[in-house]
Image: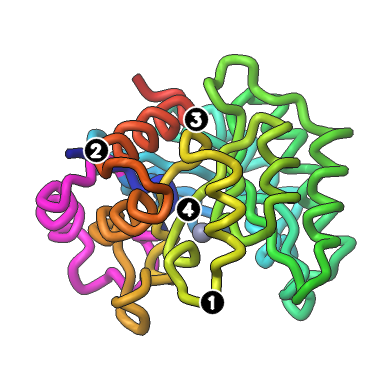
């Protein structure tokens, strides 16, 4: 059985001691056919492409500006990003979006401005998008503002089987439905496995097991049972088992669906 980790940060310093060994040995042993590296700050773009270049069959790259790092964007590195996005190793524009829990790093208005710039770049290169949306408590304004921007500014890639994913899905069915209506997939990770998150599981079940892809978002968000430990793509089968069990479908079927969806999203054959 094979899996894909659709969203990882293997260039994080947490992996400095064993990155190459992890990629070339531990991942293939765990059935991870591909891990997609998200370079979401200016200093991460070239290293993400380089990681994919060193491991062409095991690592893909996605480049963009995370809302938390939006304050790092300036006219010079925006131009650099525009030049890097068409690279064949870059599969999408991400992670981009709105995070209403981190205004101490980037103010709301600046986040919205940069999100608009990222959508304009995605429209220009016609690649899919990887969305990061995080709400402050029970206030879902981050989702409202994201969907509003998508509706008015985004021209989904016509070539992609799925034009985007709502990464780290952590909301209600209402938000899942709005995402699905725009052709987005839902990215399922450790959050789906945490005891307190029954509402996320219920929303995903209602959305349908055919609308999901798997991710770790490592080194963060280790699944239940491994919390507190460093997360890495070899935990994908654990998340898959948990999801297959909850969604009441065979593990093989979940593996097959999520690999197919991830390949459709990232334009892989
Ligand atoms: Zn991430």
In this orientation, does residue 204 appear?
Answer: yes
Q: Position of residue 52 (x, y in %)?
A: 32, 42
Which residue occupies the extreme front position in the image?
248
Cα gap from disc 2 to disc 3, whole angstroms: 20 Å
Q: Earlier in the sequence, mark 4 or mark 2?
A: 4
Q: Earlier in the sequence, mark 4 or mark 1?
A: 4
Q: Position of residue 145 (x, y in %)?
A: 86, 52
Q: Residues within 10 Å of mark 1 (few under 14, many from 20)?
A: few
Cα gap from disc 4 to disc 2, whole angstroms: 17 Å
Image: magenta residue range:
9-34
Cα gap from disc 1 to disc 2, whole angstroms: 27 Å
Q: Position of residue 111 (x, y in %)?
A: 79, 59
Residue 26 highlighted magenta (yes or no)? yes
- Which residue is identified by label 1? 196
Q: Do the CB atoms of the residues marked 1 and 2 lie less than 8 Å apart?
A: no
Of residues 71 and 207, the one drawn nearer to the viewer in this rendering? 207
Of residues 81 and 126, the one drawn nearer to the viewer in this rendering? 126
Q: Position of residue 227 (x, y in %)?
A: 36, 80
């Amino acid at each position: 059985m094979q899996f894909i980790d659709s969203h990882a940060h293997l260039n994080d310093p947490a992996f400095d001691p064993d990155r190459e060994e992890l990629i070339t040995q531990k991942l293939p042993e765990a059935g991870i056919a591909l891990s997609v590296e998200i370079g979401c700050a200016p200093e991460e773009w070239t290293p993400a492409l380089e990681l994919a270049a060193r491991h062409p069959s095991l690592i893909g790259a996605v480049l963009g500006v995370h809302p938390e790092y939006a304050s790092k964007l300036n006219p010079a590195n925006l131009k650099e990003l525009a030049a890097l996005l068409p690279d064949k190793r870059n599969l999408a524009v991400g992670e981009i979006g709105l995070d209403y829990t981190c205004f101490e790093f980037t103010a709301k208005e600046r986040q919205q401005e940069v999100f608009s710039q990222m959508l304009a770049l995605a429209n220009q290169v016609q690649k899919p998008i990887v969305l990061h949306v995080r709400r402050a408590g029970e206030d879902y304004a981050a989702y409202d503002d994201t969907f509003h921007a998508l509706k008015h500014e985004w021209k989904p890639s016509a070539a992609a089987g799925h034009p985007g994913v709502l990464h780290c899905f952590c909301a209600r069915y209402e938000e899942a439905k709005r995402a699905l209506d725009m052709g987005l997939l839902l990215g399922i990770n450790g959050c789906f496995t945490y005891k307190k998150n029954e509402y996320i599981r219920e929303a995903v079940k209602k959305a349908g097991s055919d609308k999901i892809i798997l991710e770790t978002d490592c080194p963060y968000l280790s699944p239940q049972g491994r919390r507190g430990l460093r997360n890495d793509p070899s935990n994908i089968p654990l998340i898959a088992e948990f999801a297959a069990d909850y969604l009441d479908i065979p593990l093989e079927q979940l593996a097959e669906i999520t690999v197919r969806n991830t390949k459709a999203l990232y334009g892989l054959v």
